[in-house]
Amino acid sequence: MPVIEQKKRMVRINGCVASAQAAKYADVDVIAAYPIRPYTATMMALAQMVANGELDAEYIVADSEHSQLSIAHGASSSGARVFTGSSGVGVQFAYELYSPISGSRMPVQMMIADRTLDPPGDFGSEHTDALSTRDMGWIMGWSCDAQEAFDNHLIAYRIGEDPRVLLPQMVCQDGFFVSHITGDVELPDMGQVKEFLPPYKHPYPLDPRHPVSHGPQIMPEQGPPLQLERARAMEGSMAVIEEVHEQFAKIFGRKYDPWLEEFMTDDAEVVFFLQGAHAVTARFAIQHMRERGLKVGMVRLRTIRPYPTERVQESLSRFKVVGVIETNMALGSVSSGGALYAEAAAALYESPKRPLMVSFMAGMGGEAIVLKEFYWMTEKMLDAQRRGKIEKRTHWVGFEE
Amino acid sequence: MATIEVQRQMLPILNSPNQGARFYNPELPSSEPFVPGHRTCAGCGPSIQYRMTSKAAGDNTILVGPTGCMYVANSSYLCTPYNVPWAHTQIGSAGSFTAGVAAAYEAMIRKGKWKGQFPNIICEAGDGSASDIGLASISGALYRNHDCLIICYDNEQYANTGIQASSRTPYGGMTTFSPPGPEVPEGKKLYPKDLARMMAAGHPHCYVATASVGYPIDLMNKVRKGLNHKGAAYLMVYTPCQKGFVYETPRSIDLGRLVVECGLYPMWEWNPEKREFDYSFRPASMRPVSEYLKLQGRFGHLHAEHIANLQKFANQQWGMMGVQLPEALLHAADAKNLTNMAAASEAQAVAETV
């Protein structure tokens, strides 16, 4: 097994390959693949690793995304560590399986490289694909670069397989911006991974020596206790998530706040609130605007399920104006914009000090959000701060003066 | 890479492949992976099949149950009738979930994470799952040749949801989605999808066979052949449903034989080594389809022409089996020689015309 003996080294790879590397380091047993861009490159890399003998796993070319997730469900139920993934409409083709997998408490891991849904179905990144499954009981968060993607896969396995949690995980990255842009990634020493990620051991797998029944039909009155248990597992995962991030920092030397990344927020009056790859551009834009004396910062949501309500409330309450960059569609929703606004606003509802909030529909169709658009959005926020009220709840960036 | 070789089970084939209804056979294992205590109907064909199948497989077995009546009626929460591991999966996930279980055991045994003989992995899919919504997933599992047995317990309808037509519902079969009326006197207008042949033709490396609860030892031997076959196997089993077929509950096994004797459920095996069909199974006698139809309320509305159509269909099936048709069956394929089945007295007359 060549990889097992590998020492720590730096490589230059894109997000898709970083995810494949993470699956290899996690020594997954079953991989369920089905092609759809842009995530496909992850499965291509894994296929080659299996062909080369670098990874001993059952590599299954499924007949659909629905089958991918069902294969993952069956394999995880049997006690195997499972890796699967998808993009765009593929994520939705598998929709039926998300609740059964979390409901049976199987820690399947799914890599998502976002893609717009149809229409427009272009290869660009919109978070609507994965976000549409956000209430299905999966632990979910976005990476903003290849290194973070690699790390998040290992972290997510560790969280999901923890016997106190036992929940599936969606490890998301923006299509193209992360999935197909190369960056420096530190591949760890296998010993570090072994120390961090113990072998997967489900307490009640499908094992002929200890027969169990998974998922029997229930009567209506038996439903609420099961739903409550799943809800508690999600809530209870928050403490485990913090614990696992600390352990990760100790072993690998990279420290992430599990919930929020704050950038230049100490004295900021207006901030962007977003998730995923556009944070990279936002950091540059903010630095430029800081040079012009504008008190702007950024708060990046790293984990959206479970939603860090208290942390979001504490953080965003400190500012005068919050501009939510959506990169997703929630048609006819409370802001007529995206899904992030509603949840951030709800988190702030109980705060005695609520900022003005505005939603920006930017990066739609997978377009890059360019620097001048960040400047434009900042102007809108500063304008709201000056006037003490927002001009309107949702701006479609690039379609207004 | 150093890997552990996967050891597989080899189950003995039972002697005395009798064609009678007798279930007793001294060679049968005493173990009962499927026990009483479930909520299936009296005379339920699929659950009779479930018992025979799991008995043939033994205790080192994992069962997969896609949604269907064998999920809902069998597995009540906190009280399931399985003495072996069992998992529910979605109705469209029959082949894929099963493939996941098989793949997990391949990997776990090979990598030393689970020690023991490779378990029998059996999926019990209804015909709605197998012929409609889960067809692609089953085809995928057969195509990829996972070491598993996928059984379609064929009660020719969606029974769990209150009797709706599936692509396996026979021509003339009344269901709540194919009711007869003045404009559509026959009820179901389409002939059933030839699912088992489709599986054999499309996945010739797999063991594929048809069976019926009317022939228990034959059924159990086909289960064992499917399990012994290294790779994927598919078994299509006729399992009458008294709720949907509307018959007297003690007659399930009788129907299981009559359907074969009438040529409506040809019994055959696909031999994956020789790549050919084995049509050597012959029922004790051949009968006109009306013998089978008259026992079931779901065919009670049929007119003479519809019965003749079904007889023509059965005669074609006999032809595919290479059976020479007796004069009586050719006679019975002509509506002129038949009577409508619209009333009980007429149903009796139908039996007397042939």
Image (cartoon, coloured by chain):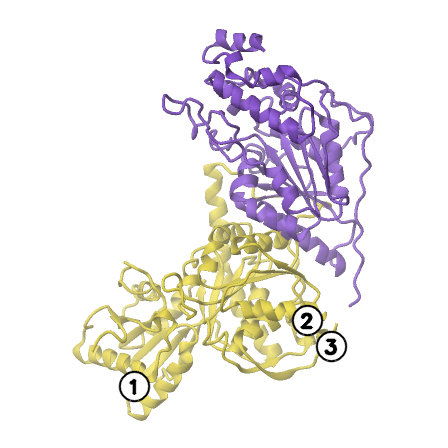
Chain colours: A yellow, B purple
Residue, disc 3: A5
Image quadrant holding the C terminus of chain A, namely: bottom left
Image position of A394 with respect to B161: above or below = below
Q: Which residue is mark 2?
A: A194
The tag earlier along the polypeptide, 2 or 3, is 3
Q: Nearer the viewer, mark 3 or mark 1?
A: 3
> Which residue occupies the extreme bottom position in the image?
A291
Q: CA distance from mark 1 to mark 2?
A: 44 Å
Using the rendered image, report if marks 3 and 1 lie on a common chain.
yes
Toward the viewer: A18 or A346? A18
Question: Sequence order check: which comes first, mark 1 or mark 2?
Answer: 2
- Furthest toward the left, the residue is A387
Q: Is residue A298 above or below residue B109?
A: below
Q: Which mark is residue A295?
A: 1
- Mark-to-mark CA distance, 3 and 1: 49 Å
Around disc 3, counting alpha carbons within 10 Å, would you say few (fewer than 14), some (14 to 19), or many (20 or more)?
few
Question: Which residue appears at 60% of the width and 18% of the height?
Answer: B330
Residue in the image at 72% along x and 57% along y: B108
Amino acid at pointer 2: Lys
Report if residue A287 is visible in the image: yes
Q: Which chain does the residue under circle 1 lie in? A: A
Q: Are marks 1 and 2 on the same chain?
A: yes
Task: Find residue A174 and name its label.
Answer: none
